[in-house]
């Protein structure tokens, strides 16, 4: 039986990611499978970004989080939800961020730099990084990840890959999104919860 230092899981990001990846069996073959699909998925990124933002705009519970100033955005802020349209500069700015995220997700090596990036994606949706005014509830992050996961599955299925490659691609992306999901959820854990879990 392998010993896992549970306290270290809460304090050492690289150790945590290695444990998660080993546990769900995300390895070099999965990385190669995802990277080989990158050129096939690239043309679908703009449509996926538009679909995500169309979904986010349907609910005040998700759309309201775009009203505060976003980290890195220096333009004019919307006055209210009604003025926050799909072609507002702030939304265009956020769409560009999502497109870059999806591109990195399928093209970067899954090394320490990428792990730090994936972790920052989770952290930046809380006041712990980026804008202190941005505090997206975990339930909204979970539904967004669920929507993105389903959209990726649909996109992969639409590629009409040979069955063996299709299955491998779906499984690899599923594992990757679970890794990302953990690196989002961990930033919603309070210090007291982390200490209890590590004890």
Image (spheres, helix red, strand yellow):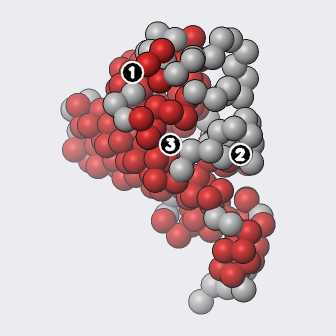
- Dot in front, 2 or 1: 2
- Answer whether residue 40 is visible to the viewer in this image: no
Query: Can you identify the residue that label 1 sits on?
Result: 50
Q: Is residue 30 left or right of residue 48?
A: right
How busy is the neighbourhood of tag 3: few (under 14 within 10 Å), some, or many (20 plus)? some
The residue drawn where x is 44% and y is 40% is 61
Residue farthest bottom in this picture? 1
Residue 112 seen in render? yes
Residue found 77% across the figure and 64% down from its top:
12
What is the spatial separation of the Cα atoms under label 3 and label 1, in whole angstroms?
Answer: 27 Å
68 lies above or below 192: above
How would you rate the neighbour count of disc 1 (Cα within 10 Å): few for under 14, some for 14-19, many for 20 or more?
Answer: some
x%, y% of residue 75? 68, 11
> Secondary structure beneath disc 3?
helix
Q: In the image, is residue 47 above or below residue 58?
A: above
Residue nearest the viewer, comparing 182 with 174: 182
Name the residue beneath numbered marker 2: 127
Q: Pick whichever, 39 or 99, lies toward us.
A: 99
Do labels 3 and 1 touch, CB within 8 Å? Answer: no
Residue 141, given in percent of the width and then of the height, sits at: 49, 47
On the image, which quarter does residue 41 sit in? top left
Please state, as top left, top right, bottom left or bottom right, where the N terminus lies in the image: bottom right
Residue occupied by mark 3: 32
Real-space CA distance between mark 2 and mark 1, rounded to the nearest whole angstrom:
26 Å
Q: For numbered disc 2, what is the local secondary structure?
A: loop
Q: Earlier in the sequence, mark 3 or mark 1?
A: 3
Q: Quadrant of the C terminus?
A: bottom right
User: Do callouts 2 and 3 mark residues in contact (Cβ within 8 Å)?
Assistant: no
For the residues labelled 2 and 3, the Cα–Cα distance comes to 35 Å
Q: Residue at x 73, y 23 (%)?
A: 72
């Amino acid at each position: 039986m392998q010993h896992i230092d549970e306290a270290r899981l809460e304090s050492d990001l690289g150790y945590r990611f290695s444990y998660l990846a080993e546990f769900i069996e995300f390895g070099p073959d999965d990385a190669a499978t995802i990277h080989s699909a990158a050129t096939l998925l690239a043309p679908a990124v703009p449509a996926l970004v538009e679909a995500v933002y169309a979904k986010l705009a349907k609910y005040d519970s998700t759309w309201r989080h775009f009203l505060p100033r976003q980290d890195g955005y220096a333009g004019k802020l919307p006055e209210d939800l009604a003025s926050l349209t799909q072609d507002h500069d702030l939304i265009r700015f956020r769409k560009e961020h999502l497109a870059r995220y999806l591109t990195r997700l399928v093209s970067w090596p899954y090394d320490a730099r990428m792990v730090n990036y994936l972790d920052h994606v989770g952290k930046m949706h809380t006041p712990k990084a980026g804008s202190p005014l941005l505090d997206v509830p975990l339930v909204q992050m979970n539904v967004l990840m669920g929507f993105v996961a389903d959209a990726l599955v649909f996109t992969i299925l639409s590629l009409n890959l040979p069955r063996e490659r299709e299955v491998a691609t779906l499984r690899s992306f599923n594992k990757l999104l679970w890794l990302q999901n953990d690196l989002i959820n961990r930033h919603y854990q309070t210090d007291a919860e982390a200490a209890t879990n590590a004890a």
